[in-house]
Image (cartoon, rainbow, N blue to C red):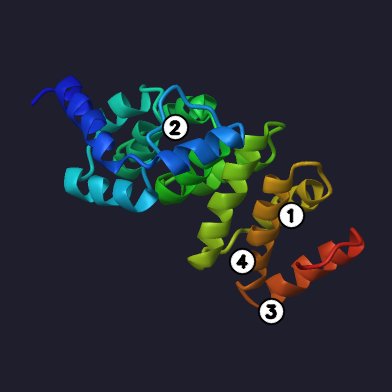
Amino acid sequence: MDIQQQVKEIKQSFRQMMDGSIAQSMRNKGVDYKLNWGATLLRLKDKAVEIGKNYDLAIALWKENVRECKILATMIMPPDEVLPEVIDIWMEQIPTQEIAEQAAFNLFQYLPYAADKAYTWMASDKELYQLCGFHILCRLFMNGQEPNERGINEFIDQAIVSLQGGSLPVKKAAMASLQRFAELGLVYERIAKSALKQANLEFL
């Protein structure tokens, strides 16, 4: 079956997953997609397992301005096959906080160059980039990945700046990643607490 036919059949399958109340709730919050079936993440995960990893299909699905297509694309894209340039294009095209978070959790954290992207993005002046950067680092720290000295300094500086910024989602992501950073060990915990104290902040 060719890719476009697969995309068509996948889009038709969303009708069975339709949840009008979820879609309406998103619209009420100002989240606007060209098409939004309100499918739950659990249903989409099941669909992703059924499809399996598929680079070409992920690329095709991402191009659709449909909430479910974009989320599914992040679930089926093989992280070891996708080039950094493609990820940069996807990042530019992320339309909402939900897609940013799904991309970070389903795909970006597993990229071989995940840490590089995270440090670049968290220092961006764009909210969704910062959000993805901190979400990736949160997951990497959770998995026991320790940053080098330069990485520690960059992360702490940027986290403190973000915690003093005006974006609530970025603040939450920065605080979550700081908490995971502190869990890497006693030295990391002291560094995090000291930085927060200097900025007149504390762990939530």
140 on left or right of 190: left
Q: Nearer the viewer, mark 4 or mark 1?
A: 4
The location of residue 179, given as percent across then percent down, is 67, 67
112 on left or right of 56: right
Instruction: Name the mark on residue 170.
Output: none
Q: Name the residue under label 4.
A: 180
Mark 1 is surrounded, within 10 Å at the Cα level, by few (under 14), some (14 to 19) or many (20 or more) other residues, namely few
17 on left or right of 188: left
For mark 3, give the secondary structure.
Answer: helix
The residue at the point 18 percent across, 47 percent down is: 50
The location of residue 18, given as percent across then percent down, is 33, 39
State how far apart marks 3 and 1 are (Cα).
17 Å
Q: Name the residue under label 3.
A: 186
Quarter of image, res 20:
top left
**Pointer 4 or 3: first along the chain:** 4
State how far apart marks 4 and 3 are (Cα).
12 Å
**Pointer 3 or 2: first along the chain:** 2
For mark 4, give the secondary structure.
Answer: helix
The residue at the point 27 percent across, 34 percent down is: 15
Q: Which of marks 2 and 1 is in front?
A: 2
Is 150 or 57 nearer to us in this picture? 57
Is 14 or 155 nearer to us in this picture? 14
**Pointer 2 or 4: first along the chain:** 2
For mark 2, give the secondary structure.
Answer: helix
User: Looking at numbered disc 3 in the image, what kind of residue is underneath it?
Assistant: Leu
**Pointer 2 or 1: first along the chain:** 2
Vertical comparison of 12 with 135: above or below: above
Q: Mark 2 points at which residue?
A: 87
**Pointer 3 or 1: first along the chain:** 1
Instruction: Name the mark on residue 153.
Output: 1
User: Looking at numbered disc 2 in the image, what kind of residue is underneath it?
Assistant: Ile
